[in-house]
Image (cartoon, rainbow, N blue to C red):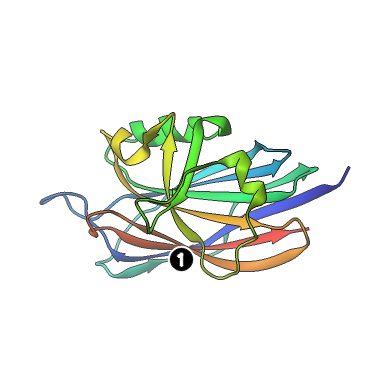
């Protein structure tokens, strides 16, 4: 059975706009990334990672680490597709971040639908096997449902910003991707630059 290597690195985040509430200073972004192997109508969690970022300048700005941050490096066996989900939060305590980060290890509880249409049909992660691989550089903005409830409505401690998804073929590739996270009120508009290597 074929084993496929997937490595994800965070190269930087561009903050076009950011909001941490009235008179509360700069935003405190947290980027969460989860990788899944999809095949046989089921999804298997490969790995999850989260990065809290410090904003030290006025917005708009770009946060760029001295070296790319390795989010994870993992192997998938017998996958038809690889899926990368990115979630973005403005942290106000971390409770929602922690709960949803842990929940990402239970792929059967999640559904995705296109972020640019309220009428788009939702899909379980295991159903993404039928999707064509995305073309770089832009990830697809999506809305996420966890246990039949929109993630945005689950966040009561941290501010939900948004989610993006990349569907990958299992053939070898090495590409740069842009994962955009835009809050419904438009106050937070962030783009993460992610490098993905499949092989």
Give left or right: position of 34 versus 16.
Answer: right
Tell me the residue at 74%/49% (across/down).
80
Q: Position of residue 117 (x, y in %)?
A: 37, 56
Tell whether 25 sits left or right of 132: left
Residue furthest out toward the left: 23
- Residue occupying image coordinates x 22% and y 55%: 185
Q: Secondary structure at mark 1?
A: loop
**Residue 135: image location, x then y, percent:** 60, 68
Up-down relation of residue 107 to residue 137 (above or below):
above
Task: Give the labeled residue for mark 1.
Answer: 64
Q: Position of residue 145 (x, y in %)?
A: 42, 38
| Residue 172 figure quarter | bottom right
x and y percentages locating residue 43 in the rendered image: 65, 37
Q: Is residue 129 above or below residue 192?
A: above
Q: Residues within 10 Å of mark 1 (few under 14, many from 20)?
A: some
Q: Looking at the image, which residue is at 58% across and 41% down? A: 125
């Amino acid at each position: 059975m074929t084993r496929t290597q997937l490595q994800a690195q965070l190269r930087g985040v561009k903050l076009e706009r950011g909001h941490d509430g009235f008179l509360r200073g700069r935003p405190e972004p947290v980027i969460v990334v989860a990788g899944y192997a999809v095949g046989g109508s089921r999804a298997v969690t490969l790995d999850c990672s989260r990065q809290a970022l410090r904003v030290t300048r006025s917005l708009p700005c770009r946060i760029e680490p001295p070296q790319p941050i390795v989010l994870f490096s993992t192997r998938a066996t017998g996958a038809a597709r690889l899926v990368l989900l990115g979630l973005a939060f403005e942290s106000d305590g971390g409770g929602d971040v922690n709960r949803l980060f842990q929940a990402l290890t239970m792929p059967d509880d999640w559904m995705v639908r296109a972020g640019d249409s309220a009428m788009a049909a939702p899909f379980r992660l295991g159903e993404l096997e039928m999707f064509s691989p995305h073309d770089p550089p832009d990830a697809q903005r999506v809305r996420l449902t966890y246990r039949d409830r929109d993630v945005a409505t689950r966040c009561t401690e941290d501010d939900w910003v948004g989610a993006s998804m990349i569907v990958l073929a299992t053939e070898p590739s090495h590409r740069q991707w842009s994962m955009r996270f835009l809050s419904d009120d438009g106050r937070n508009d962030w783009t993460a630059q992610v490098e993905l290597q499949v092989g």
